[in-house]
Amino acid sequence: MPSPVIASPKILSKVNTKPYYKNGNFVLYFGDAINILEQFPESSIDMIFADPPYNLSNGGFTVHAGRMVSVNKGIWDISKGFEDDYDFHYRWLETCRRVLKPHGTLWVSGTYHSIYQCGHALQSLGYHILNDISWFKPNAAPNLSCRFFTASHETLIWARKEKKSKHTFNYKIMKDGSWPEDKIKKAGLQMRSVWSIGTPKKEEKKFGKHPTQKPLDLLKRVVLASTKAGDIILDPFTGSSTTGIAAIVHKRKFVGIDNEKKFLDLSMKRFEDLKIS
Ligand SMILES: C[S@@+](CC[C@H](N)C(=O)[O-])C[C@H]1O[C@@H](n2cnc3c(N)ncnc32)[C@H](O)[C@@H]1O
C-alpha cells in the first residue's frame, strides 16, 4: 500500500459527499460529475484531464485481436442526440471552469463524435485553446467496411481558463525528456502536436480493463507537460483512473469522479498496486 507523500487535498473538506475511496493524495468520488463538482470550492484545481463519453456506442463494429466485436462501450456512451450531447458537454465544461484555478488548464480528449462539440463549448465558455494534440495510435484496429479511412487517432484539446492566464508548460521536460515509446519525437527537438503512443499495454489491464482505457504513457505526458509536483489534478470521468495513476507516480494530488462503481473499484486496485516511496 503506498504511503501518502503530501497531505490530502484540503479543498475536499468543503465537499459534502463522502469520498468513495481516499488514500493519501488519491481520492475517488462516486456520482455524477456535475453534481459532485458543484460542491467543490471555486478556483481550487490546478489541472483537469477529462475523457468524457464519446457518444459513439451506437451499434457499430470494430476488430479486436483479429475478431469482429461491437464498438459499444456501455450505456454511458450512447448518444442522446446532437442537442442533448452538446448540452451535456457544455454543462460539464462550465462546471469545470468554475473549479479551475485562474492559471489552471483543462485537457479534453475525444474522437470526431464528441471533440468538435467540446471545442465549440470550450470557446463559448471563454476558455482559450492552447493546442489540439493529435494522439496517433500506431497499433489502431483496422477498418472493417473498407469504405473510408481507418480511424487511428484521437484529439486532445488543451485550453487555459482564459486568455490572460499564465499557464504551466514544462517546455524543457517535453523537449529534452526521454520518450522512447514515440517514434515521431526526435531527441532534443521541440515536442510537436502529433504524439505517437500505442494503446494500453497488457500490464496496464492486469486488474481488468476499462472499455476506453487510456495508455499510461499518454497521461504521463499530459501530467508532466502541464503541472508541477504537488498540484491538484482532477478527472471528472475517471474510469480506471489512468490520470490518477500518472498523477501519483509523478507526485501530484488526484481527485477522480465516476458514476460506475466497478470502474472506481478498478481504479483502487490500480492505485494500491503502485509502489510509491
Ligand atoms: C471515456 S471513459 C474514461 C476512461 C478513462 N480515461 C480511463 O483511462 O480509464 C468515461 C467514463 O465516464 C464515466 N461517466 C459517464 N458519464 C458520467 C457522469 N455523468 N458523471 C461521472 N462519470 C461519468 C463512465 O462510467 C466512464 O468510466
Image (cartoon, rainbow, N blue to C red):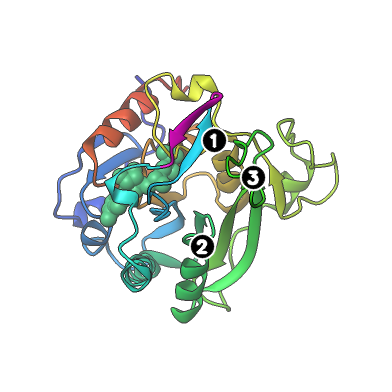
Q: Position of residue 106 (x, y in %)?
A: 49, 61
Q: CA distance from mark 3 to mark 2?
A: 24 Å
Q: CA distance from mark 1 to mark 2?
A: 19 Å
Q: Position of residue 60 (x, y in %)?
A: 44, 46
Which residue type does callout 3 highlight?
Cys
Judging depth in this view, the residue of 94 and 114 nearest the camera is 114
Q: Earlier in the sequence, mark 1 or mark 2?
A: 2
Q: Is residue 253 visible?
A: no
When the figure is inspected, residue 94 is found, relative to residue 203, above or below; the finding is below
Secondary structure of residue under mark 3: loop
Q: Which residue is mark 1?
A: 215
Q: CA distance from mark 3 to mark 1?
A: 27 Å
Side of 125 relative to 128 (left or right): left
Could you classify mark 3 by the number of other residues whose Cα lies within 10 Å: few (under 14), some (14-19), or many (20 or more)? few
Q: Residue at x 20, y 50 (%)?
A: 31
Q: Quadrant of the N terminus?
A: top left
Q: Which residue is mark 3?
A: 146
Side of 42 relative to 228 (left or right): left
Q: Residue at x 55, y 66 (%)?
A: 159
Secondary structure of residue under mark 2: helix
Q: CB under 8 Å between callouts 3 and 1?
A: no
Q: Which residue is mark 2?
A: 115
Which residue type does callout 1 highlight?
Pro
Secondary structure of residue under mark 1: loop
Q: Which mark is residue 6?
A: none
Please count the marks in the image: 3
* Magenta segment boundaries in residue numbering: 65-71
| Nearer mark to the viewer, of 3 and 2 | 3
Q: Residue at x 66, y 38 (%)?
A: 197
Q: CB under 8 Å between callouts 3 and 2?
A: no
**Is 136 a magenta residue?**
no
